[in-house]
Image: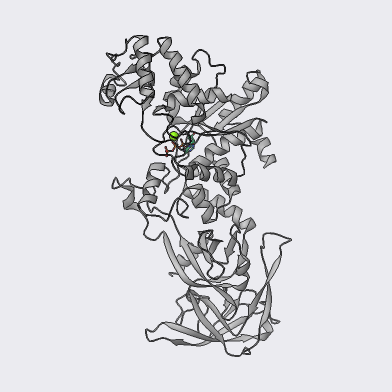
Amino acid sequence: MEENKEIKPLNFIEKIIEDDLKNKRVPDDRIVTRFPPEPNGYLHIGHIKSICINFGLAEKYGGVCHLRLDDTNPEKEEDEYIQAIKSDIRWLGFDWGKNEYYASDYYDRLYEIALRLIKEGKAYVDSLSAEDMKKYRGTLTEPGINSPDRDRSIEENLRLFQEMKEGKHPEGSYTLRAKIDMASPNINLRDPALYRIKYATHPRTGDKWCIYPMYDFTHPISDAIEGITHSICTLEFEDHRPAYDWATEIDGIEHTPHQYEFARLNINYLLMSKRKLLYLVKNNYVSGWDDPRMPTISGIRRRGYSPESMKDFVQRVGVAKVEGVVDYALMEFCVREDLNKRAKRLMAVLDPVKVIIDNYPEEKIEYFEAVDNPEDENSSTHKMPFTREIYIEREDFMEVPVKGYHRLYIGNEIRLKGAYYIKATSCEKDENGKVSVIHATYDPESRGGETADKRKVKGTSHWVSAKYNIKAEVRQYDKLFKAENPGMSTGNYLDDINPESLIVISDAYIEKEAENAKVGDYLQFVRNGYYCVDSKDSKEDHMVFNRTCTLKDSWAKQKAKMGL
Ligand code: ATP
Ligand code: MG
């Protein structure tokens, strides 16, 4: 990673920071960034980009990154979200130390600033309804119109604002607005609202307040109070920058932070709006925010993605100012690259059919040594028990082979991975004509997978002892949406939900070694994909494994070529 950093060209934010540092524009040469989530939902993959940028820059330039919970919307915010946000950031490997702040910490300070603005004639209490306020605001091409309340006296403004605070007026009856310019070409400067009345209990301030400050007022002032030097956000806030600058230039605010915008991360096949994700959770389209199909950090973690692979992914995507859509395949590529290096290989048979090796002694057990990770020269190994009865994948046997089929069929010899060569002799079928047992013979000379005569076999199958194994539940996860742009064709993203996004296999057989797998381990079931132990539902006597992702598509292609 270090080497990479040296040769990578700087992104536009790094250039700004290096220039600021060089020209001594940063107090104490110490940059301060912040990650400011609103605790109204769980963090998603898009947030990973913002987290990596903010915490990453602080790390790179020896500064600090604050965690600021932007909690100014009490109706939608919950403590559960705050706890999840914190554990998700820690999972990514970032630490804010003591710098945990809440916008609600600044309510007193914001209130004082609002009072001062009123006293200086720079803010007024407006009684326009929300609807009228919108009408008076004008459009991109037309200037707005002054509210009839704009010239209310300072005394009256002070009295009304006080009454708003004391709960004497209903929601929507009054708003405190900044007096800036109703004809400004930037709509966000047309007397933006500073405070609204809201009778809601706040998770942190309880019922102390019934007026709450607006985002465009709270955010810049919170940044200023915390001494943020570089306030980095997504492009949709570009139009708000003049309002940001207005707020940080209010008299009496000692520090002037600056806002910089970058393009948000969008990925095809995924939805990353908290509102839509909340809808999926509330209406049971998924099992919760941490459903392994959710693009939330808690979802991908339960799915088995590693934090390192996601950091690698956002690094590859880069930081730019142009919006685009990143390919889901790039993300999975990063996930696989990483898992390939670290996953412990195990054999699992997901669609089992029994093989009886008739010339193998009934009570005999042999142990074959399997390398945990062939990508690692110093890999540890584990033992696989081999017995007369084993399971192989149903698709690894054909009674009558199609052309080009090299796996097991009657009369054909294959290699059992890491064990013996076997040759099928006959099969039994159930009343539906489905193969229930395959009979085979093994060549004792082929122990370990080779023979003295070095004869070649074309097929290799993975296998699990039918006597010593773990019977487990395996959840085959796939993309939650089957369309690249969910909702695009019908206008409703629910129409694009993939009905096969979860297929549960209740009776898979996994080699005995699987009983040592723990939550957080990265596994590969040979030929089947990458897997992990489910953190919620897996129990000692009923293990549950989640498919993280399939192996490279080459396997799917190979299958297609054979017409299977
Ligand atoms: P939503 O609009 O879905 O409610 P949000 O963007 O408003 O989500 P916040 O909690 O306000 O969610 O976001 C915290 C920070 O993360 C903000 O600085 C925001 O710009 C950034 N962020 C959110 N989504 C993305 C994304 N897709 N890519 C990069 N950064 C993002
Ligand atoms: Mg937001």
Image vertical order of residue 444 relative to residue 249, above or below? below
Q: Picture coordinates of residue 118 (x, y %)?
A: 41, 13
Let me know if residue 206 appears in the view: yes
Does residue 381 sit above or below 96 in this rendering?
below
Q: Farthest residue in the right direction?
A: 378
Horizontally, residue 214 falls left or right of residue 439, namely left
Q: How is the image coloured?
A: one colour
Residue at position x 39%, y 23% in the image: 165
Q: Which residue is nearer to you in this view: 174 or 260? A: 174
Q: Is residue 370 above or below residue 162?
A: below
Image check: 406 left or right of 133? right
Q: Where is residue 551 drawn, in percent x and y?
A: 54, 60
| Quadrant in the picture for the C terminus | bottom left
Q: Position of residue 512 (x, y in %)?
A: 61, 73
Number of residue marks: 0
Q: Residue at x 41, y 82 (%)?
A: 434
Apparent side of residue 415 relative to residue 559 in the rendered image (left or right): right
* Residue 43 seen from this side: no
Q: Nearer the viewer, residue 371 or 76?
A: 76
Q: Measured from the top left, where is residue 140 in percent x and y?
A: 32, 21
Quadrant containing the N terminus in the rendered view: top right
Q: Kindly indicate the quadrant of the structure image that contains residue 238.
A: top left
> Which of 552/32 is in front?
32
